Amino acid sequence: MEPHTVLAAEASTSTSRTLTIVLFLVFVAITLAITVWASRQTRTATDFYAGGRTFSGFQNGMAIGGDYMSAASFLGIAGLIALYGYDGFLYSIGFLVAWLVALLLVAEFLRNSGRFTMADVLAFRMRQRPVRTAASVSTIVVSVFYLIAQMVGAGALVSLLLGINADTTFLGMNADTAKVVTIIMVGALMIIYVTVGGMKGTTYVQITKAFLLMTGALLMTILVLAHYKFNLSSLLGDAAQQSGKGDAFLQPGLRYGKETADAAETFYSKMDLLSLGIALVLGTAGLPHILTRFYTVPTARIARKSVLWAIGIIGTFYLFTLALGFGAAALVGGDEITAQDKAGNTAAPQLAQALGIDYLGGDTGGAVLLAVIAAVAFATILAVVAGLTLASSSSVAHDFYANVVRRGAAPERDEVRVARIAALIIGAIAIALSIFAQSLNVAFLVALAFAVAASANLPAILYSLFWRRFNTSGALWAIYGGLFAAVFLVFFSPVVSGSATAMFPDHDWHWFPLSNPGIISIPVGFLCGWIGTVISKESDADKYAELEVRALTGHGAH
Amino acid sequence: MSTETTPAERYLAVQRSDEFAGLRKMLRGFVFPMTVAFFLWYLLYVLLSAYARGFMSAKLVGNINVALLFGLLQFVSTFLIAWYYARFAARRFDPAAERIYDDLMTDEVK
């Protein structure tokens, strides 16, 4: 397309860079004000962990969307579609279908029988200390993996979105310094949101972000569709043509399940696609930061309503990204996108600039829309990392400190104080790890977080809720077995070593052919849970009666 | 149930009651088959994307091919199942669960 759509075009870059920073600072100021307000409403442990359980179905549905639609969703999926066409869309579908697992099997029963964390349900009829320790370990592993991927992504994005290239500086910082500063700033903000605002503050941050993200994506979708006179077919045709890949762009196979001359390679590539799809669908309902959201509403029925809202919001959002991705391919073009970022993460902002130039009054309009979308992307990252930090610090305080260390005898005030300290420590560790990992390719950590959630947490949750015989030994086997299987396989997979895009591209110790462990590790998790259960004689019929009656009727719910 | 029963005995009695067994059966009879159904339906979609590329690439109207339609149908089925479950829960599950809940509360008040 026309050269003026290049993101780094000098004049518009400086305008939109300033505007991006101003808009982002406005978002930070508003969310900090909300956080301070929320801190005044936060007195009890229920306030801190569960936002007082007073959110409505719509509010929690928005917050779930805000928690779930990460920068990887917004920029990542739009970028995948822009570069690989159909396969990006295929990827997004697993993230949506997954919500049916949460809706049908988890949300209401968890809300009815737990208080603050995933472990409340897992440890309900088990020996508290070992099960809570295991649940805490897997909560922290899943959340920290996810957190590092988000924070490293934030560091990389800021230089792209602000247009700081290798040879330019910004406020005296070069691109590398800017990355480190971004990671520290994102980390500091998430620590403030969580320690000061607790669940109430974090929830409002997520609601605000979800509103901004949906509005921004809707606006761009309308502009893209209007450009093609609401004719989807001509948008697709133009996208296929501009992508340089022709009809293949509209068909599966450019990214996942690639067919090559090597039969084994083709087979593994297709298995990888299947493995990824299964992990996405089964992982969502095992993500601790998603599970804790169900505790923020008064009843199970409202938890159900919030999932229904979330399905509507998230589904609509992925339909928007479909238009954004193909729109970017058609209106910006594959070459200009990869010139900016090889992974396509800037496709959505580049599209915003192109649309602004065409429809909102030339270069200024382009700079404005680019700035708005870039600021929305930053807001997106902040809301997600805050949710992750809150979920892991809650588990440290409520599961590990209060129930393992203090054996359930800790006063609420101590517990909440520990949660705040834990948020600070986890945040600091995440910042340190992210700075260390920033030059490594850690994008696979998101898929790994889903795989661990599906392999360790989901089997334990489902067995807990639906299997009378399940016991302490089964819970430990499921969590540690599924966790170990997923992490072990990924460690020996091509995403860690032995490929050009690996975390350690210069080393090769891989022997597991798939990048996604789910197809093996999820059955292993379920199988371990079963074996662990049947080799132990322990069984608490009374407590299972209580759990089942409470889960289904809401009796005794907190 | 008498007022002398402990909470544990009360939960056990409820769990063993026909009414609760009916509630459990109603719930599992809906959510388990539905979970299997949407999971297989999703798996079919992924498998076709991996192995039936010719079929998925067939054009239907203009540039809209079977793959795109199939993908959009996953959205439609997800929305429909969510709506259908909400209807089931509101019409059948909630009233039955509420009756048992009310019985438990009345026992406590006694």
Image: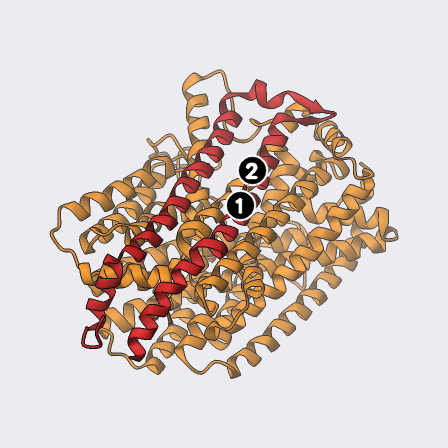
Chain colours: A orange, B red
Residue A234: x percent and y percent? 78, 31
Q: Which residue is mark 2?
A: B74
Give the left or right position of residue B8, taking residue A519 as reference: left
Residue toward you, A439 or A142: A142
Whether residue A258 is visible to the viewer of this picture, yes or no, is yes
Looking at the image, which residue is at 46% across and 27% down?
A270
Q: Is residue A197 above or below residue A111?
A: below
At x 71%, y 36%, the residue is: A329
Q: Which quadrant of the structure image shows residue A336?
A: top right
Work out whether residue A344 can be spotted: no
Amino acid, disc 2: Gln
Disc assigned to residue A96: 1
Marks 2 and 1 sit apart, C-alpha to C-alpha, by 9 Å
Placement of A308 over or under A506, stated as above or below: below
Indicate left or right for A524 with A335 as reference. Answer: left
Give the x, y percent position of residue B63. 72, 26
Counting from the top left corner in percent of width and height, residue A196 is at 49, 77
In the picture, the disc for residue B103 is: none
Instruction: Look at the numbered discs 2 and 1 and tell me whether their residues touch, using CB distance below 8 Å.
Output: yes
